[in-house]
Image (tube, rainbow, N blue to C red):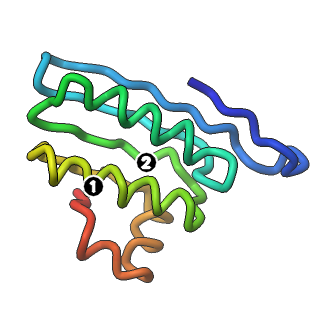
Amino acid sequence: MTVPDGDSGGRAEPLSVVTASADPGHVIIIVSGDLDLVTPESLTAEFSQALDPVPSTMVVDLKAVDFCDSTGLSALIGLNNRCVADRVVLQFLTSATIRRLLLRTGLSDLLPVG
């Protein structure tokens, strides 16, 4: 799935989300581009689809994400909350930029970052 960058003047990278499953109980979601105001609904929809049926583990690879605003963070927190409720073992793999953002916002204590 790719989401266009809206009215950003072409500066934002379009969101790309690829979901793969190594086996029925393990889901890998690879996200690239920017997590911003125009992408959270699409990202949340992709997360919901990946959780149906509920896997035992999920890895969200954010290593190719260079920008994330508060709406992107909200989508990640929502996924974490859903995984906790469904007892899915979740791990976020982050780029250096996203890791710094999570540290600065205090979310590195909440989100399972590997």
Residue placed under numbered mark 1 in the picture: 80
Q: Is residue 112 above or below residue 33?
A: below
Residue projecting furthest to the right: 9
Residue 63 % position (x, y): 43, 48
Question: Residue sitting at 9 percent across and 34 percent down?
Answer: 56
Viewer-nearest residue: 12 or 39: 39
Q: State left or right for residue 54 relative to residue 5.
A: left
Residue neighbourhood size for the residue with mark 2, other residues' Cα within 10 Å, grouped as few (<14), some (14–19), many (≥20): some
Whichever of callouts 2 and 1 sits on the residue coming sooner in the sequence is 2
Residue 44 % position (x, y): 46, 41
Residue type marked 2: Lys
Q: Secondary structure at mark 2?
A: strand
Viewer-nearest residue: 24 or 95: 24
Residue 68 % position (x, y): 56, 60
Residue 16 position by quadrant: top right
Q: Is residue 87 above or below residue 53?
A: below
State the quadrant of the N terminus. Answer: top right
